[in-house]
Amino acid sequence: MRRTTLGAAALAALLTVSACGSQTGTPEPRAGGMVRTATPPTASAVTGARTGTAHAAPLPIDTGWGPTAQEINRARALVGRLTLAERAGQVIYARYAGTAAPTDLVDRLHLGGIVVFADNYEDTDQIRASNATVQQAARRAGRDFPVGIGVDQEGGIVERVTGGTRFPAFMTAGAADDEALTRAAAQASGRELAGLGFNLDYAPDADVTIGRSDPTIGSRSAGSRPALVARQVVASARGYESTGVVPVLKHFPGHGSLTTDSHLALPVQRRSLSELQQRDLVPFKTAVAAGLPSIMVGHIDVRALDPGMPSSLSRKVVTGLLRDRLGFDGVVVTDSLAMHAVSDRFASGPAAVRALQAGNDVVLMPPSPKLARDGIVRAVREGRLSSARLVQAATRQVALLLHEQAAGLETAAPGSGSAASAAWSAAALTSVSGPCSGRLVGSRVSVSGPPTAVDRFRTAAAAAGLAVGRRGTTVRLIGYGGAAVRGDVVVATDTPYVLGDSAAPVRLATYGDTPGAMRALVDVLLGRAPAPGSLPVEVAGVPRSGC
């Protein structure tokens, strides 16, 4: 995605004042000691287009995160033509039911976007047609900018769209620690997503995992070392950006150090701010410095900042920490408001309003998009949410969509990324016990494990000329949530922690059960390739972290 560095005069021309801030030229403090002087809005700037009511001029929007000055100005003009209800809908990205294109939902509420899940998906042809229909219907309804169409396509266990290339878990990036391969894998994934009509991917995970006691993130994290995670996150995001697909990093301020799943309850983060800065925040600080365009805020009770309030709804976290302290001016997205960490406490309308008050730009997947939209409208009319904050949020995300549209999507056919996926897995495959070279199995093997992984192993073995039957060297594949088993060769295909529970003479980690990962595994078993990866997390009970 293109980036334009503006001169001081051009940047100053884009900056206006908040309705809830000073309108007398009082300096507004920002991150890194920067100070912006607010300018009183003109009479024309506070006239509400098509609403018949007054609203303040938009809040400041920087351009280091993607869109050009021209794209931001165009976004402001487009948002200025929307009614209040349309602006409120524009900041909402909703989930929908069924496999038919949700054109009525999008157009009726003027939604900013939709999020596709497995239950919306039949095959690649269907989802490509559905996504195209949504964009076409929005254009016919008079929308002059794209609809955001997002998906959780991380690889590994979080994969909503199948039928194309299967990518391993992001922990592969930490094990291989090769930024070029990570970028190539994300680029290949992004091209396939773009070819299906997606323009946002809620990936990669910037969480730093604490290891085995992390029940939510696990192999979705690149590892437990902050600097390692940071460089792999940036590499992955750059790969997606190169295709025109917007990467949305998650889950600020870091979910990998928590032992409660926010889908089920509100996790409590008891680390001090200093501790967060040294670990959990490192990948996000690096991402902000790299100018990445969008960050998702998780639902976490950060006791050091705003006790009892989910971070996604906390102004102290979103504005105070992410925007002011870290200096992020891009698009901030809440995690799904349907998750119990929020939905058990706030209904759709109040949650959406709190999210915008906190500083988010996109309200993601409220249980009721209509109630969320109506709640935002009511809050603006009653003065509980400034019109300027809503305009700023809508302008940020419309500008990013315009930027993506101008850059163009780099598309590829489903399955075209198989070589990039396989190369990534081959570089990550890790041996924690047994010989580091030479053949590891006899002329025949017996394999067991999750059916999908076993089928892919059998396919890879057949292609390599390795016989598979009821007898021979025993190869045991252990997937997500699996327990240790006995065998001559034990292979962890998700997180590697289970390898520490095994006494097998040969123990390997693949971080995925994709066709490419299984081909890499067979090559190592036959002694045709080394296992070059290293454990990106601590695993108790293994002799080494790699060969």
Image (cartoon, rainbow, N blue to C red):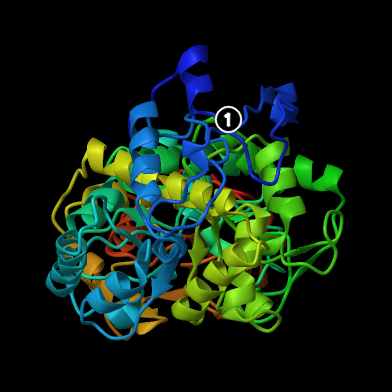
Q: How many marks?
A: 1
Which residue is more in the foreground, 44 or 314? 44
Q: 98 above or below 225?
A: below
Residue 374 placement (x, y as % from top left):
50, 75
Residue 531 placement (x, y as % from top left):
44, 48
Q: Residue at x 72, y 59 (%)?
A: 314
Residue 417 placement (x, y as % from top left):
22, 51
Can you see residue 535? no
Q: Residue beneath label 1, please?
A: 289
Q: Residue at x 78, y 47 (%)?
A: 276
Classify the position of the N terminus by image quarter.
top left
Q: Is residue 479 left or right of residue 208?
A: left
In the rendered structure, which amino acid carries the disc numbered 1?
Ala
Which residue is more in the foreground, 369 or 48? 48
Local crowd at mark 1 within 10 Å, few (<14), some, or many (≥20)?
some
Q: Residue at x 54, y 62 (%)?
A: 219
Where disc 1 sits, the SS reads helix
Q: Is residue 166 left or right of residue 308?
A: left
Q: Is residue 318 left or right of residue 96?
A: right
Q: 296 above or below 129?
A: above
Can you see residue 414? yes
Classify the position of the C terminus by image quarter.
top right
- What is the quadrant of residue 484 in the picture? bottom right
- What is the quadrant of residue 178 in the picture? top left
Q: Is residue 403 left or right of residue 276?
A: left
